Image (cartoon, helix red, strand yellow):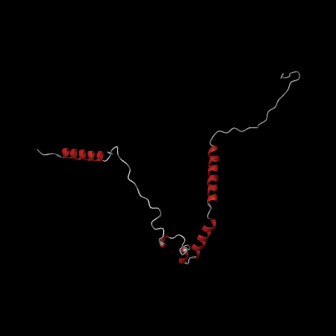
Amino acid sequence: MSVGPPATARHILTALLLLSCAGCLVGPDFSSPSAPVADKWLEANNPSVDTRNQEYRDWWKVFHDPVLNRLIEIAYNQNLTLVSASTKVLEARAQLGVAIGEFYPQIQGPGTATYIGFPGCRAES
């Protein structure tokens, strides 16, 4: 008796289903494996990654391009500090709040009140 394509596909599908379910089984005594971490970065003493080296600080000057030099100078001079950048973010959020607030109904009017007293009518206290 020959096994046709539908039976073969069914057997393969059953085998794949059983294998995928077997991957989900974890016993009650499971503990996650330890992941050792180095105390310091392994290449911390490598001179090629030393950030204190100022040799490459002005890397763009090798192009001898005055326009590029001027653009870099402008970028350095206009670079925002962290405090001023966060202030600008807060300012933008406040402006957004004002813009959103204009979509809601608003009540405006004078805040005056007038009391008219009639002669002979006094309030008892």
Q: Residue at x 85, y 26 (%)?
A: 117
Between residues 107 and 43, which one lies in front from this camera angle?
Answer: 43
In the displayed structure, does residue 1 sit left or right of residue 32? left
Residue drawn at point x = 79 percent, y = 33 percent:
113
How many numbered dots are placed on residues in this image? 0
Quadrant showing the C terminus: top right
In this rendering, is residue 45 above or below 113? below
Quarter location, residue 102: top right
Quadrant in the picture for the N terminus? top left
Q: Position of residue 76 (x, y in %)?
A: 61, 68
71 vs 110, left or right, is: left
The extreme left residue here reads 1
Dividing the picture into quarters, in which one does residue 84 lie?
bottom right
Please give the name of the residue rendered at 67% of the width and 39% of the height, measured from the top-left corner: 106
Task: Using the image, determine if residue 105 lies above or below residue 125.
Answer: below
Q: Nearer the viewer, residue 47 or 84?
A: 47
**Farthest right residue in view:** 119
Q: Nearer the viewer, residue 58 or 19?
A: 19
Estimate the x, y position of residue 103 in percent, counting from the top left: 62, 42
Q: Position of residue 65 (x, y in %)?
A: 56, 76
Q: Position of residue 9 (x, y in %)?
A: 22, 46
Q: Nearer the viewer, residue 118 or 2?
A: 2
Up/down of 113 relative to 53, above or below? above
